[in-house]
Amino acid sequence: MVRYALIKVALVIDDPSLQEVVVRRLRQFDFELLPVESAYELPMLVTKNETDVVLLDIRLKGDEKLQILAELKKARPATEVILLSNHDCIHWVMEGMRIGAFDDIPEPFEVEILSNRILAAWRRKKSVKKSIGSSLVRYFEKTMMAATFAQAGEFETARKFSGKDDTSETISDNASENEKKS
């Protein structure tokens, strides 16, 4: 069972009354909620607090919010973003999804649905971070094995671990360079 208190959710909602309602309703799920007064504070808050999911209201100033979304995804690609929208901002939703938003929730919405989307976004973040981590570990393991074999003078074996076991590729590259010089 997932403990929602472990999930950090930043809230960027322009309408204070909506933010108050969302905060009050999401508290029943025991998320760690981080209300943000200005969308411009978001990238710093996400980095500082290791935020898992962001609820980003794009109903007002959608173009500015999408710039912030792009900055956020560039700095913290694993952080998932759910867009809060309405029927008037479909074009911003489409652009937000292209930039990397996880999902959108059109207003009006049920808090249970929002809670489920937050949980799904958090699970996706966990799986992305895990796959990135395991890929890096495999890469470093192979690199270290290749370095060890190279240091021992086993250059063919080192090439196999480094993924460069085809010497014909190197030979053809050298031939192409020689032809260009001629």
Image (tube, rainbow, N blue to C red):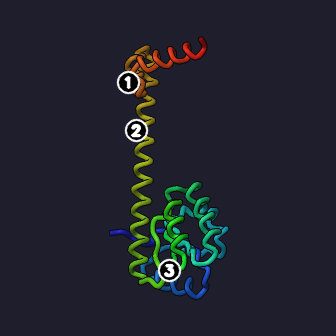
* SS type, badge 2: helix
**Disc 2 crowd, CA 10 A, few/some/many (<14, 14-19, 20+):** few
Q: How far apart are marks 3 and 1 (CA)?
A: 55 Å
List x then y, in percent, for residue 14. 61, 80
Q: What residue type is labelled 3?
A: His
**What residue sits 36% from the left and 69% below the top?**
2
**44 is higher (above) or lower (below) than 161:** below
Marked residue nearer the N-terminal end (3 or 1): 3
Circle 2: residue type = Arg
Residue bearing the label numbered 3: 87
Where is residue 165? Give x, y as percent.
39, 22
Q: Earlier in the sequence, mark 1 or mark 2?
A: 2
Residue topped by disc 2: 138
Q: Is residue 9 visible?
A: no
User: Which residue is found at the position 44% from the left and 48% from the top?
Assistant: 132
Task: Please give the name of the residue rendered at 60% of the width and 72% of the height, measured from the top-left corner.
Answer: 62
Label 3 crowd (10 A; few <14 / some 14-19 / many >=20): few
Which dot, 1 or 2, sits closer to the camera?
Answer: 1
3 or 1: mark nearer the eye: 3
Report the amino acid beneath label 1.
Lys
Circle 1 Cα neighbour tier, 10 Å, few/some/many (<14 / 14–19 / ≥20):
some
Question: Is residue 117 rendered to the left or right of residue 21?
Answer: left
Q: Mark 1 points at which residue?
A: 160
Residue at disc 1, secondary structure: helix
The residues tagged by marks 1 and 2 sit, at their Cα atoms, a distance apart of 14 Å
Q: In which quarter of the image is the C terminus?
A: top right
Q: Which of marks 2 and 3 is in front?
A: 3
